[in-house]
Image (cartoon, grey):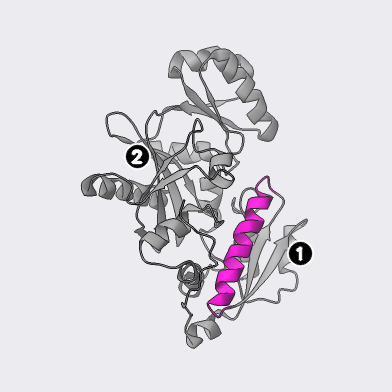
């Protein structure tokens, strides 16, 4: 696996003018969501990279009341490295926007929409972007009807969790009931969608451009939490193995998905390819992981962008696209 630990000596330095313009930067990490541990790892990596690039950056472990983060801020802008609820769903974005504090990534509406996998799929569908057939599941009693309409295998996921938390591949009505009950314990909204058999790809976006696509393969049923953060046998393909034409098509689909949801600056779009070679959109991530297993830094590296430069470029967009208070 590629070494993405960000400990290699990198000579990238932000210019003195940029460092001055950025001022004192807070890196928000941790949070209270199910992805807290991943967020702490992401935040520490971002903090270290910003500091090594010469930026006056300080880590803040955001816990408890989010409003307290802006009561008497001792910073000029925020790099959001919070994953999951509270940090990726528009909540912290709304608080910072109301306080007039610039922050990285997508604004309130796009963050809230992308965090809701079900409503994101409604947007894809409404805009003519291909996404697997799906249903919102509200009770275990719907299992027979859903299997009759969508067939099997199916993917079952909590609609508001990230990092593949709570996702199950199911092949029968009884498995669907069991997976629904697990997901429903985590979330009041459960999404069930057709399982696309085939390779999985992810496309990272930076400043309205698609970075090289990454092909993912794992011995797990799919690219789950363990494959993402713990396993060392997950395989990342860059180049992704597609023809130039197919990769361009994949990148364009990711850009289209990113734009229709209303995202900005950076993010990641996850896509499946079926046996016929067609692409199917799964979801948009507005604050993707930045850990040593993470995909955005990997894609940036393939494009010749170091981790330090990547985080500075994400932060730099807060100068030109600072949210209106």
In terms of secondary structure, where does tag 1 sit? helix
User: On the image, numbered disc 2 is attached to which residue?
Assistant: 129
What is the spatial separation of the Cα atoms under label 2 and label 1, in whole angstroms?
40 Å
Please tell me how crowded label 1 is: few (under 14), some (14-19), or many (20+) other residues with Cα within 10 Å.
Answer: few
The residue that label 1 is drawn on is 68
Q: Which region of the structure is painted magenta?
A: 33-55
Question: Could you tell me which secondary element the residue under label 2 belongs to?
Answer: loop
**In this rendering, position of residue 103 left or right of residue 239:** right
Note whether residue 97 is visible.
Answer: no
**Residue in view at x 46 percent, y 13 percent:** 148
Q: How many marks?
A: 2
- Residue 267 image offset from top left, x and y in percent: 47, 55
The residue lying at 78 percent from left, 56 percent from top is 64
> Left of 299 or right of it: where is 97?
right
**In this rendering, is residue 90 above or below 57?**
above
- Circles 2, 1 touching at the beta carbon (< 8 Å): no
Q: Nearer the viewer, residue 299 or 102?
A: 299
Chief secondary structure of the magenta portion = helix
Magenta highlight on residue 241:
no
What crowding class fits label 2: few (fewer than 14 Cα within 10 Å), some (14-19), or many (20 or more)? some
In the figure, residue 31 lies in which quadrant?
bottom right
| 66 or 242: nearer the viewer | 242
For the C terminus, the image quarter is bottom right
The circle on residue 76 is none
- Residue at 63% x, 18% y: name it: 140
Percent coordinates x, y for residue 199 in the rendering: 37, 36
Q: Can you give x and y, in whole percent of width and height, for residue 281 in the image?
A: 40, 39
Report whether 298 appears left or right of 7.
left
Q: Is residue 77 visible?
A: yes
């Amino acid at each position: 696996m590629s070494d993405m630990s960000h400990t290699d000596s990198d000579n990238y330095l932000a210019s003195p003018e940029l460092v001055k313009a950025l001022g004192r930067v807070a890196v928000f990490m941790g949070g209270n969501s199910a992805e807290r541990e991943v967020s702490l790892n992401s935040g520490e990596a971002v903090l270290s990279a910003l500091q090594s690039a010469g930026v006056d950056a300080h880590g803040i472990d955001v816990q408890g009341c989010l409003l307290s983060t802006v009561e008497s801020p001792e910073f000029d802008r925020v790099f959001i490295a919070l994953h999951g609820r509270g940090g990726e769903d528009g909540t912290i974005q709304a608080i910072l926007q109301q306080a007039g504090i610039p922050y990285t990534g997508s604004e309130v509406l796009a963050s809230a929409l992308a965090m809701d996998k079900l409503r994101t799929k409604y947007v894809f569908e409404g805009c003519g972007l291909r996404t697997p057939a799906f249903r919102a599941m509200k009770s275990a009693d719907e299992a027979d009807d859903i299997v009759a309409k969508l067939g099997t295998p199916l993917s079952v996921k909590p609609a508001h969790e990230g990092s593949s938390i709570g996702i199950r591949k199911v092949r029968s009505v009884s498995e669907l009931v069991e997976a629904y009950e697990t997901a429903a314990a985590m979330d009041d909204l459960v999404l069930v969608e057709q399982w696309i058999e085939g390779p999985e790809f992810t496309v990272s976006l930076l400043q309205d451009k698609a970075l090289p696509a990454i092909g993912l393969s794992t011995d797990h049923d799919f690219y789950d939490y363990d494959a993402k953060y713990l396993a060392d046998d997950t395989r990342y393909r860059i180049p992704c193995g597609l023809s130039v034409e197919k990769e361009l098509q994949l990148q364009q689909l990711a850009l289209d998905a990113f734009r229709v949801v209303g995202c900005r600056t950076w993010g990641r779009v996850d896509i499946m390819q079926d046996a016929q070679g067609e692409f199917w959109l799964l979801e948009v991530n507005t604050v993707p992981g930045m850990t040593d297993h993470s995909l955005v830094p990997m894609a940036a590296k393939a494009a010749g962008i170091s981790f330090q430069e990547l985080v500075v470029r994400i932060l730099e967009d807060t100068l030109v696209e600072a949210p209106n208070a």
